[in-house]
Amino acid sequence: MNLNNLGRKSLLVFIGIIFESAIVMLVNILGAKLFGVTAYGDFILVFTWVMFIVSFTKLGFDQSIIAYVTKADVFKEEYEKNNIVVFSLLFSFIFTFVISFLLYINAEFIAVNLLNNPGLDNLFIIQIPIIFLLTFTHISLSILRAFDKINNFTQIKYFLIPSLEILVILLLYIMGVDSIALVIGKYVSLTVAIIGIFYLFKNITSIHFFKYLHLYKKFIIFSLPLVLSGLIVLTISRIDILMIGYYLEGDKVGIYNIIVQISKVSLIILSTINTIFTPIFSKLYVSKEYERLKNTYRSTTRWITFFTLVYLCEIIIFNEEITAVLGENFKQGTVVLILLTIGYFIDTSVGSVANMNTMTGRPSYNLYSSLLVIILNIVLNIIFIPKYGINGAAIATMTAVSLSNILKLVLLYRHTKIQPYNIYYLKLFLSAAGSLIITMGLKEVFSSESIFMHITIFLFFIIIYIFSVALLKVSDEDKQMLTKYIKKIR
């Protein structure tokens, strides 16, 4: 795929991610408002454990399938491509079934020892089918990406699934259904998505399935580090939810989780780039176009940083106003919002570093860097949550996310000598810092609770920021990339 052809697809993905993020945030807010913060918090606590289990049952196939399919495309190996797709789905189905059965017979033990709440065993049992659905959805969506069906991927992941989920929840609430509606919403949306994806690949057949046993073995070996890497990445980002649920009440889980959704808005740009450019990184590396790979990674990372700096500054300026809009209970999450947004900004500022490690043949680097961080994350949560509550959890997560990504970048540079930074990053930070200081002063002068005034102040920040960046000048490389990108979107 040529980079010049990515404009329209990237725009669609970007719109899709914004739409999904908005709906997911709305689902979380409605879950707390309609069913109560405590009931919603209990659902989130159990669902977080489900997400951890899914990271295991996927077996890393959702990441490795992209590398294998794109490699087969480069070398025109159609049969290998089809067989690896069929194998990944069949093997994960059998594995997920076994794990789900074991979870079902041990539900009471899990509720007592992991959830620290015996009353959540039934809620855990009714969420077990979601493990099946999420596993197949994640792997199937990755197959769509690997086959360059980005439009279908975007339509299903970012539009169909969240839209169905919120519609089902609202319909069931109107019918008088309690918080179980949150679970049913997952059931319906994921089931419809899987049916739709399978229909798109109905013509894929596996010819000489057993002929490629050696390929399946290599595929599994390649995927195994990704299992641990995926689990650890999820642990870094979600261990706070689990430990808050263990140490504190359910309402704290609900409040914290919604704040997490708001802080993660800064990841939208990174998600867009990862969705579009991961197959590109893989193809450029396989084709030995190392200079293009380096330039692409550098340019995309700079533009990610440019846009996410805007969101970070917005949170710094309006953090109290944002939490106040959610309700009185959420004002205790003001510090959490700032800390988490800083952590996720650092996450985005290193660009697609995790995918770069994977697509350049070093998926184990993500594992090594994360293993060193996960211990610190757990230790900090144990120390800070009992003492500082949800603020302590935010400190632990910010620290873990930041260190994890910095270590991945160091390992990427060691392997490829690729790193995205130069003098233009300093210009971006100087522009953002100057614009932030001016805007904060303006907010103090025109102190007002008017939404119109808040919007005006934020727009003023954006104008100053863009003007400052333009004044300090961006690189010719970035100008060329942006020009090509805009032309393709038109």
Image (cartoon, rainbow, N blue to C red):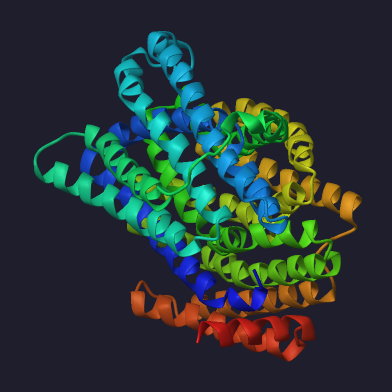
Q: Is residue 172 left or right of residue 110?
A: left
Q: Considering depth in this image, is 208 or 148 the residue closer to the camera?
A: 208
Position of residue 398 relative to residue 89, above or below, is: below
Q: Is residue 83 left or right of residue 71?
A: left
Q: Residue at x 63, y 75 (%)?
A: 437
Position of residue 87 relative to residue 65, above or below, is: above
Q: Quadrant of residue 216?
A: top right
Q: Quadrant of residue 421?
A: bottom right
Query: Can you give x and y, in whole percent of width and height, for residue 304 in the image?
Result: 64, 67
- Classify the position of the N terminus by image quarter: bottom right
Residue 465 appears in the figure: no
Q: Residue at x 41, y 50 (%)?
A: 331
Please, which residue is most extreme toward the left here?
175
Q: Considering depth in this image, is 156 or 327 the residue closer to the camera?
A: 156
Query: Can you give x and y, in whole percent of width and height, for residue 309 in the image?
Result: 62, 68
Query: Can you give x and y, in whole percent of width and height, for residue 321 in the image?
Result: 41, 63
Q: Residue at x 56, y 83 (%)?
A: 488
Q: Residue at x 27, y 41 (%)?
A: 188
Q: Is residue 94 left or right of residue 290?
A: left
Residue 411 appears in the figure: yes
Q: How many marks?
A: 0
Query: Can you give x and y, in whole percent of width and height, for residue 17 in the image?
Result: 46, 61
Q: Considering depth in this image, is 328 or 425 the residue closer to the camera?
A: 425
